[in-house]
Structures are given as C-alpha cells and as structure tokens.
Amino acid sequence: MTIDATEGGSLVQRATVLGGGTMGLGIAQVLAVAGIDVALCDASPALTRSAMERLRQRTRTQVEAGLREPEDMDRVGSVRGCFPPEDAVAATDLVCEAVPEDLPLKRSLLHSVSGAAPTETIIASNTSSFPIDELAEHVHRPQRFLGLHWFSPPEWVPGVEVIAGSRTAPEVVHDCHLLLRRLGKCPTDVASSPAFVANRIQMAMFLEAVSCVEDGLASAEQVDEVVRSTFGFRLPNFGPFQIADMAGLDVYLSVLRTLQDGVGSRFAPPPRLVELVEQGRFGTKAGAGFGEYSADEGDQLMRYRDTRYAAMSRFLSKPLISDGSDANA
Ligand SMILES: NC(=O)c1ccc[n+]([C@@H]2O[C@H](COP(=O)([O-])OP(=O)(O)OC[C@H]3O[C@@H](n4cnc5c(N)ncnc54)[C@H](O)[C@@H]3O)[C@@H](O)[C@H]2O)c1
C-alpha cells in the first residue's frame, strides 16, 4: 500500500511488547527510541525484569560503541516492565506479540490479550510462519489484528512485512504503515500464507546452501563466502526480478535447464520465464523482461547500478573498526 508519510503517523503513542527475547527487545527499543511509551512483558515477573535488564544493557553497549545517540539510553530507560500480559495491554494503542513460534502459545496469548486490550488497540503478531487467518480465529476483533513481521535484529533491519488477514480493516494496515515509516522502517504488504515472502525465499536459499555442502561442492564456510561476495553483494540494491532482467532471462533459462538436467526437477524453468524468453523479452538488453525499459531507463538503471556498486565496494573495503594497522582505515 502506498502511503503519504506526511499524512500523520502519531496515532500510536503507547505500545506493549509481549516477549522480551531476540525480537521483542529490538522492537521495544525501536519504539522507545521513537518516543513511544512502551511496556514490556515476558512470561513471568522475574523474566520480565531480566528482559528489561537485557534491553538496557544492549542499548548501553550500542551507545558505548558509538552506534546510537546517548539520549537513546534515557528513552529506553523509560520502558516499563509489566506483568501479567492482560495488565500490560490494558491501556495501549498497539500490541506487538513476539513470543516463541509455538502455535498453541500464540493462540492462547492473543486470545487473552485481545480480550483485555481497549477495543481500538491494534494487535500485531511477529509470527515468522503462521498464516494470519489461523491466528485471527483466536483473536477478539480480528479487524484490529494483523501480522507485522520484523527481521532480526529489528533495531537495524529496515524491512517489515505487513500481513493483513482476510478480516483486517484497511485502516489498521494504513496506520501500521504510518507507524513503521515514522520508525524509519520499510513496510511492504504481503499476503497471508505459510512463512510469507521473505522467509519463503530465504528458506529456499538455505535448503540449496545445505544441499551444496551435502553434495560436496563446498564447505559451509565456502558457501557463506560465495553467497556473501557474489549475488549477496547485489541484494541491498536490487531484488531477484531486477537482477534477472539485468543478467538476461535467456541466460537464466539456460542455467535453469542445465540445473534441471544435472541436479533435479526442482530447477525446472517456470512457465512465465519460458514465455518471456519466447517473446524475446530477455531483460534490460532487449528493452523488456519482467519489467519494461526504454533506452533511457536502461541507461539510467546501469548508471544507478554502477554508482551503488562503486559505493558498496568502497564501503566494504574499509574496516569498520581500525586495528591500527590498516592503511585504508
Ligand atoms: N529470531 C528471529 O530471527 C526472528 C525473526 C523474525 C521473527 N521472529 C519471530 O518472533 C517471535 C519471537 O522470536 P524470538 O526469536 O524473539 O524468540 P525468543 O525465544 O528469543 O524470545 C521469546 C520471548 O518470549 C517470552 N515468552 C514466552 N512465553 C511468553 C508469554 N506467555 N508471555 C510473554 N512472553 C513470553 C520468552 O520468555 C522469551 O523471552 C517468534 O514468533 C519468531 O518466529 C523471529
């Protein structure tokens, strides 16, 4: 959904984060640093206290490393520990559920907190994989419920998948976009299905990475190095369709046929790719592929690519923390 970021974005002033683990702490930190009044709740009073301590320690470490402003320590210091969850959501505009990926646990917690929260509260699950409609069945007011899927570590990774269920009200999606933009995040709407978009693609890559090791092509370390230094280098700038268009869809088709013959039917070229190649839509070099490219647009894209890649090369060649011996530092 395209949202005008100037429309507002201050609708959420109070938020409750359920679960103070890897994700919940980062989400609580992002919300608190943006000036939102945050309550944090874990599975017991003692676990909530320990989560609060870890949140402060994590922020202190980042401030000391120069990664955050010193004022962030005060903002994070204002986060309140609260237990039980029903009390923690009693006066809040937004609930971010980030408890373990356990379906009965999420269902039962979402049921009880959606019953205890004010009627206008938005309830968001950070589930990595459960379809939102399956969770919505257990939520009071499913029109105020959706998935907000943050990525680890949530304080740094910009992307958040926004997953509406079939009964989620459009204004809830709209308000979440505004909030996420206000937090400096990049929200993208995706449909509800198992594991959504990012994890589906990430897991497909992971399965192939494991297969490469099991087939004896390379060690895990070597696979990591190949991914990081080859197509991983492109990914901060371009997605798979833009990359395929720039590489040439005829090339992709040929590679997939070789993989299909040599490795297995899971690499069978998709009909859409075959069709595009049959139509002569080979990508940017042909003026069309998955996208359309006028001569000017093609040239602009190449300039953009080269500028971004040159900047990435410079950035990656510099050590971030000088060991005192590097001439590039
Ligand atoms: N770890 C990741 O990389 C990642 C990325 C994106 C999404 N997610 C999703 O985020 C959610 C949380 O993952 P995580 O990695 O932070 O898990 P985690 O195990 O690190 O933290 C979960 C926290 O929830 C607490 N908890 C358990 N029961 C609770 C209850 N009833 N009430 C309140 N708190 C409770 C636990 O004590 C723990 O502190 C999961 O749904 C996961 O799939 C994880």
Image (cartoon, rainbow, N blue to C red):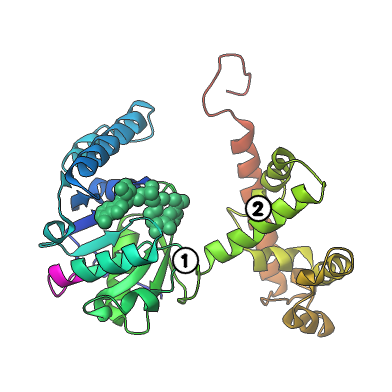
Residue 287 in percent (x, y) is at 75, 75
Instruction: Assign the C terminus to one quadrant of the image.
Output: top right
Between residues 2 and 174, which one lies in front from this camera angle?
A: 174
Residue 155 in percent (x, y) is at 38, 47
Q: Tell me: 248 left or right of 67.
A: right
Q: Tell me: 29 left or right of 298.
A: left
Q: Is residue 186 above or below residue 223?
A: below
Residue under pointer 1: 129
Residue under pointer 2: 234
Seen at 88% across and 66% down, the residue is: 258
* Element marked by disc 2: helix
Mark toward the viewer: 1 or 2: 1
**Badge 1 or badge 2: first in the primary sequence:** 1
> Would you say the magenta stretch is mainly helix, strand or loop?
loop
Between residues 184 and 42, which one lies in front from this camera angle?
A: 42
Look at the numbered disc 1 and say if its residue's Cβ is closer than 8 Å to ligand 1.
yes
Whether residue 27 is visible: no
Give residue 78's mark.
none
Q: Amino acid at mark 1?
A: Ser
